[in-house]
């Protein structure tokens, strides 16, 4: 019944991505002809792990909860039976942030970096106000579409505070994961602020703030949390931008800024003239020039900003 109803309303096209249990296709409406992304999950492939099934149940609920925000991926239709779930969502058909990082090298000017960062932290803050933590903010989940809007949310999103543990260590990617997650401690939505801070640092410096020659060394560097601003890299970065990074990449969660505090800091700094966050994107250039060889394999390119960015992951 699910397949029949879906096929009456939509036509599947080429595959866009694939995860452990599902696949994402481009599709178009049989009525309007508009293009969408269809995420199809085969329930029969799900493991007996209750976490997998919980993620499957939560994802459409969270997407519906976030409906109406222009910076969040919108779900347009849901089809489900005993074997499959089909979610029809906004189409993100341009290269994601990681792909753009992988194909270019250099650094952003401060206005360029904040033209990407500002809508990112705004969308994260919106999720947090609704009790939703993304838990895997990274360039792979920042997608661009032809209309220039950006979104945030992926399959591992959860509601409220989450306790740390072995299973939770998979929430995040080495460069972006917060130290409290690695430590197995209880953590909350501020893990997203840490991850967003790493992205901002990378755009300004061309290198991640914490990295090693292996994932294990990277984890150790994150746990140490020794944040530095090498003069040769940060010479042109304002003291206010560096101060904001310190407040986001703070190991002490109680002192780390919330997403709302980050936005307030930006607004205050912009009004004071310390941060120029309003540079027209027509003036944005791809001027990446400095990149450390040791992390070239992961950070070959920093993107040219688009006015809007979307975040989404193709899992599960």
Image (tube, rainbow, N blue to C red):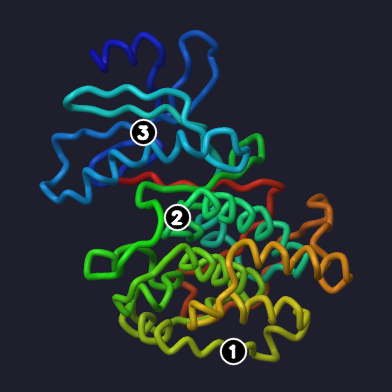
- Which badge, 1 or 3, comes first in the chain's sequence? 3
Disc 2 designates what residue?
134
Q: At x 38% / y 76%, what residue is drawn?
A: 180
- Looking at the rendered structure, the secondary structure element under dot 3 is strand
Q: Is residue 291 above or below residue 70?
A: below
Furthest-left residue in this view? 48
Q: Residues within 10 Å of mark 2 (few under 14, many from 20)?
A: many
Label 2 with label 3: CB-CB less than 8 Å: no
Label 1 with label 3: CB-CB less than 8 Å: no
Q: Distance of mark 1 from mark 3, alpha carbons?
A: 41 Å
Q: Nearer the viewer, residue 198 or 214?
A: 198
Disc 1 designates what residue?
228
- Looking at the rendered structure, the secondary structure element under dot 1 is loop
- Horizontal and vertical percent position of residue 182: 33, 76
- Horizontal and vertical percent position of residue 90: 51, 32
Q: Residues within 10 Å of mark 1 (few under 14, many from 20)?
A: few
Quadrant of the rendering where the N terminus is positioned = top left
Disc 3 designates what residue?
39
Q: Is residue 44 above or below residue 127?
A: above
Q: At x 42% / y 86%, what residue is drawn?
A: 221
- Horizontal and vertical percent position of residue 217: 35, 85
Q: Distance of mark 1 from mark 2, alpha carbons?
A: 26 Å
Q: At x 26% / y 17%, what residue is drawn?
A: 2
């Amino acid at each position: 019944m699910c397949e029949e109803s879906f096929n009456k309303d939509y036509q599947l096209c080429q595959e866009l991505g694939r995860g452990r249990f599902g696949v994402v296709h481009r599709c178009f409406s049989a009525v309007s002809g508009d293009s969408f992304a269809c995420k199809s999950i085969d329930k029969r492939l799900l493991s007996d792990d209750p976490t997998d099934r919980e993620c499957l149940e939560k994802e459409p609920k969270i997407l519906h909860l976030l409906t109406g925000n222009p910076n969040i991926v919108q779900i347009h239709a849901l089809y489900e039976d005993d074997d499959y779930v089909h979610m029809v969502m906004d189409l993100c058909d341009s290269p994601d942030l990681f792909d753009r990082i992988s194909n270019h090298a250099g650094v952003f000017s401060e206005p360029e970096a904040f033209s990407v960062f500002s809508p990112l932290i705004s969308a994260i803050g919106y999720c947090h106000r609704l009790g939703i933590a993304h838990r895997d903010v990274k360039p792979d989940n920042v997608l661009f579409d032809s209309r220039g809007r950006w979104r945030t949310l992926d399959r591992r999103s959860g509601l409220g505070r989450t306790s740390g543990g072995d299973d939770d260590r998979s929430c995040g990617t080495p460069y972006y994961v917060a130290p409290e997650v690695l430590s197995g401690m209880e953590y909350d939505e501020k893990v997203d602020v840490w991850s967003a801070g790493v992205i901002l640092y990378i755009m300004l410096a061309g290198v991640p703030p914490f990295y090693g020659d292996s994932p294990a060394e990277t984890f150790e560097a994150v746990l140490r949390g020794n944040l530095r601003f090498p003069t040769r890299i940060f010479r042109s970065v304002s003291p206010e931008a560096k101060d904001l990074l310190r407040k986001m990449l703070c190991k002490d969660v109680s002192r780390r800024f919330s997403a709302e505090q980050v936005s307030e800091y930006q607004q205050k700094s912009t009004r004071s003239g310390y941060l120029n966050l309003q540079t027209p994107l027509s003036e944005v250039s791809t001027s990446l020039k400095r990149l450390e060889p040791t992390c070239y394999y992961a950070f070959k390119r920093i993107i040219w900003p688009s006015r809007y960015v979307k975040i989404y992951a193709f899992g599960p």
